[in-house]
């Protein structure tokens, strides 16, 4: 008889959009239910073609490179701070003794690829992601990310409605 799979490490993915709290609370409940580690991830997308065109038009190559490197570092640091505050607020609201999030990750790249890469790298047993998000970043961006993650993940994916 085959044993049941164990869930020891969960990857929660967020864009910190308006409706992400229910998804985070689901991830928290699963972490508590399974007594699992909970990793929190936000992926920052690189500058788009329009932004690169504007920068290339007005700045020389070295200035563009410096701006991108310094700006990227600053964005990653600020996002990690926002994730930490979000986590503290939510764990406080849920009346949890200690924050169950064991690691906060911020990465840069194409969201679906980074989510899958970091899930493999950290050896997670499942991924928790919201079904869709607001239209601020191009329509149904998180929806397409969630679809790609579900399609290509090697571990189970909890696709949680976040409305």
Image (cartoon, grey):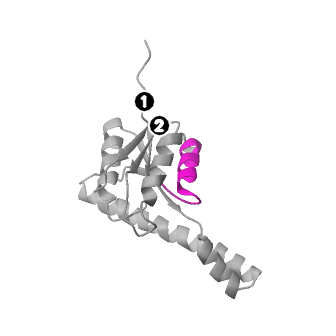
The percent coordinates of residue 119 (x first, y second) are 53, 44
Residue 103 visible in the shown view: no
Residue at the image point whose x is 24% and y is 54% from the top: 94
Give the vertical position of 54 relative to 106 (above or below): below
Give the vertical position of 141 relative to 117 (above or below): below
- Say few, some or many: other residues with alpha carbon within 10 Å of mark 2 (under 14 / 14 to 19 / 20 or more): many
The percent coordinates of residue 111 (x first, y second) are 53, 56
Give the vertical position of 121 relative to 48 (above or below): above
Residue at the image point whose x is 53% and y is 36% from the top: 154
The percent coordinates of residue 161 (x first, y second) are 31, 50
Which quadrant of the view contains residue 82? bottom left
Q: Nearer the viewer, residue 107 or 130?
A: 130
Q: Which mark is residue 6?
A: 1
The disc, 1 or 2, on the residue closer to the chain's N-terminal end is 1
Q: Which residues are magenta?
A: 103-121
Q: Residue furthest right?
A: 61
The percent coordinates of residue 36 (x first, y second) are 40, 40
- Which residue is under mark 2? 125
Instruction: Answer whether labels 1 and 2 touch (C-beta < 8 Å).
Output: yes
Quarter of the image with the N terminus in it: top left
Q: Residue furthest front?
A: 139
Q: Which mark is residue 45?
A: none
């Amino acid at each position: 008889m085959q044993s049941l799979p164990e869930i020891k490490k969960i990857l929660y993915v967020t864009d910190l959009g308006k409706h992400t709290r229910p998804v985070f609370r689901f991830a928290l409940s699963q972490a508590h239910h399974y007594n699992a580690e909970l990793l929190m991830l936000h992926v920052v997308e690189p500058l788009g073609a329009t932004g690169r065109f504007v920068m290339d038009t007005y700045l020389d190559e070295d200035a563009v490179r410096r701006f991108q490197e310094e700006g990227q570092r600053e964005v990653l640091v600020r996002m990690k701070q926002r994730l930490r505050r979000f986590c503290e607020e939510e764990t406080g609201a849920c009346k949890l003794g200690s924050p169950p999030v064991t690691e906060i990750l911020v990465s840069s790249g194409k969201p679906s690829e980074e989510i899958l890469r970091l899930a493999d790298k950290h050896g997670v047993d499942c991924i928790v992601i919201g079904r869709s998000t607001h239209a601020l970043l191009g329509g149904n961006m998180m929806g397409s990310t969630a679809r790609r993650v579900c399609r290509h993940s090697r571990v189970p994916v909890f696709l949680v409605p976040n409305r």
